[in-house]
Amino acid sequence: MILAGAIFIMGSVGVEMITAKIAFIGGEENWAYIILMTIEEAMEMFGIALFIYTLFLYINIEFGSLKITVKGNKSLKNEKKITSTEPIKFH
């Protein structure tokens, strides 16, 4: 979990500072800015995904299983289903 947090912080703070400097010097319409922005966002998403994975792994090791039940007040058994046999037309 610490590694996931480190990856997220490195992306959101570390790469963000470099990206801001490049945006200040050359604007946001250059390849270096676009590539670094992509790396920054990818690091943030990977950090979150790694955190979720390690959290589920921890739950599996500590508790053996996890069961999530979602119940609503309204039953969908009697709801009408929307179906169409016509193809979608694009204009």
Image (cartoon, rainbow, N blue to C red):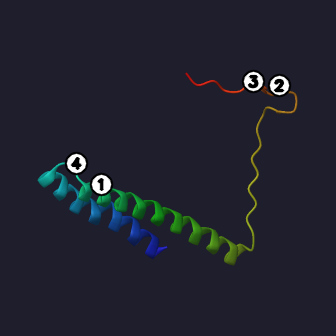
67 and 50: which is toward the camera: 50
Instruction: Please report the residue visible at 42 percent of the width from the left and 61 percent of the height from the top.
Output: 42
Q: Between disc 4 and disc 3, whose residue precedes?
A: 4
Q: Nearer the viewer's eye, disc 2 or disc 4?
A: 4
Instruction: Please report the residue visible at 27 percent of the width from the left and 59 percent of the height from the top.
Output: 16
Distance from disc 2 to disc 4, alpha carbons, whole Å, reads 49 Å
Residue 59 screen position, x and y as percent: 66, 71
Helix, strand or loop at mark 4: loop
Numbered mark located on residue 28 in the image: 4
Residue type at the position of mark 4? Glu
Distance from disc 4 to disc 1, alpha carbons, whole Å, reads 7 Å
Circle 1: is it few (<14), some (14-19), or many (20+) Cα within 10 Å? some
Q: Between disc 4 and disc 1, whose residue precedes?
A: 4
Numbered mark located on residue 80 in the image: 2
The residue that label 3 is drawn on is 86
**As displayed, is residue 89 above or below residue 68?**
above
Query: Which quarter of the rendered picture does the C terminus lie within?
Result: top right
Instruction: Please report the residue visible at 52 percent of the width from the left and 68 percent of the height from the top.
Output: 50
Circle 4: is it few (<14), some (14-19), or many (20+) Cα within 10 Å? some
Q: Nearer the viewer's eye, disc 1 or disc 2?
A: 1
